[in-house]
Amino acid sequence: MKLEDVITQVLPRIRPGEEERAFVRRLMDELKEIAIETAERLGINAKPRFVGSLAKDTYLAGDHDVDLFLAFPLDTPLEALREKGLELGKAIAERLDSYEVAYAEHPYVRARYRGVKVDLVPCYDVKSWRDVRTAVDRSILHNLWVLDNLGGRNDDVRLLKRFFKGIGVYGSEIYVRGFSGYLTELLVIYAGSFADVIEKHEMILRMKVLDPAGWLRREPELSMKTVERESEAGVPLIVIDPADPRRNVAANLSWEKFGKFYFKAGDFLKKPDVGFFFPPEKPSGSYSAELRRKGTHLLTLLFEKPELIDDILLPQLERSAKGLARALEKEHFRVFGMDYGYSGERAFVMLELDRWEREKVTVKPGPELHTIRARDFYRKNERVWMEGKRLYAEKRIRENLVDVVSDLLERNQVALGKNVREGIKRAEILLDFVPQWLERDAYLFLSREKWNLKG
């Protein structure tokens, strides 16, 4: 199949139709009217500004999340913006269907209206990058730059977004670390089209630095500081933000997600297929068979999921999984991989290890004889000997992996996410077994199908 034929098949599935566009227009008009009326009633000087894919007409069919920013004058004190912004957001949300307060750099409101998620975010009404005072302020500038430069390539953005979603690299959230919607738009603008982004994937990797707005020429000192800082951080890609030369749009992009795009783009060029955009469901199998095949062991901690949004919960689960892996490595277990997540009211952390037991004793090196600690070491240990002038002792250790983990958690020897710490300490610890609801996750984890570049 030719690339053009694939695009012809994919576009009707991802491009919103007229009925859907009419719904989005009505939705935005209603929200804008509610926001203006509420601000006037409360006497709050803030203007509604739509940002994101709906405002730029780069949204995918069926994906209608609304980003409605409440833009305050630049002379508004930051504390007043936070206080009045939350007051206004809650007052608007009370006229919608439901809402909750969420927290980023400052509080904002997450609401639902006509079945659509609506984020109500306070910001400053900036006109230039020099006006930016909070992290969200740039979104207004992003919107304007894309609208001025996209040049009718909206469907190319849709194709690239769907391609990124299909291969599992879309989303800039900290627990995803993939390509954001804005970065996707910039790649299309920079390269020329969806096909150009795919064809230039090798060049994008080699170039390392992309400068769509020409900041390296216009603001060389600031933009070079950005390049140097991000290069030192070891990021896979630097895209100098057209709205702010101090920022790398791809700062959150991980090597894993960039690498997957790199390989999948190459595969797609060799053999274009609709499956890259709409992949079949990952195959399932027996996690027990995977354990037998590999000769490894599966450690699983199950605990009650705290009431946290994904932006907070998933990074804390990741931190806890990494902390547990580091602690077990120090206890002489070899960790081959980790996974984490939740389903319903239960959260989990999984680790694959080389064994479930270890030797009953280990040799513990001690201090040299002439040091202050020598007598203390001699007193505290049962079997003590010397090799040259250094003392050694035989240290009894727990044999079973479950006992080791329990002991580590009890002694606070594992770095855990603060909001999941108590839950993990009370977790049910399973070895080479998971409940039925977790069997698919366990298989995908152990078989590496969840991350398999060729899968």
Image (tube, helix red, strand yellow):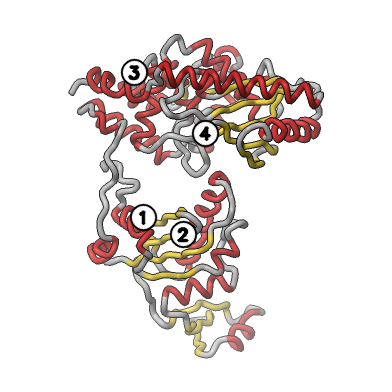
Q: Amino acid at mark 4?
A: Gly
Instruction: Please report whichever mark, 3 or 2, sits nearer to the chain's N-terminal start.
Output: 3
Q: Nearer the viewer, mark 4 or mark 2?
A: 4
Q: Would you name the residue on which mark 2 appears? A: 348
Q: Tell me which residue sits at (48%, 84%) in the image.
A: 396
Instruction: Please report whichever mark, 4 or 2, sits nearer to the chain's N-terminal start.
Output: 4
Instruction: Please report whichever mark, 4 or 3, sits nearer to the chain's N-terminal start.
Output: 4
* Image location of residue 425, percent across then percent down: 56, 68
Identify the element where label 3 is drawn.
helix
Q: Amino acid at mark 1?
A: Asp
Q: Would you name the residue on which mark 4 appears? A: 115
Identify the element where label 2 is drawn.
strand
Q: Is residue 222 visible?
A: no
Q: CA distance from mark 4 to mark 3?
A: 36 Å
Instruction: Please report whichever mark, 2 or 1, sits nearer to the chain's N-terminal start.
Output: 2
Tell me: residue 182, above or below residue 340: above
Instruction: Please report whichever mark, 1 or 3, sits nearer to the chain's N-terminal start.
Output: 3
The answer to whether 19 appears left or right of 377 in the picture is left
Q: CA distance from mark 1 to mark 3?
A: 36 Å
Classify the position of the C terminus by image quarter.
top left
Classify the position of the N terminus by image quarter.
top left
Q: CA distance from mark 4 to mark 1?
A: 29 Å
Which labelled disc corresponds to residue 441?
1
Residues marked 2 and 1 touching at CB (< 8 Å): yes
Q: Would you name the residue on which mark 3 appears? A: 196
Q: CA distance from mark 3 to mark 2?
A: 41 Å
Q: How many marks?
A: 4
Q: CA distance from mark 2 to mark 1?
A: 10 Å
* Image location of residue 324, percent across then percent down: 49, 62
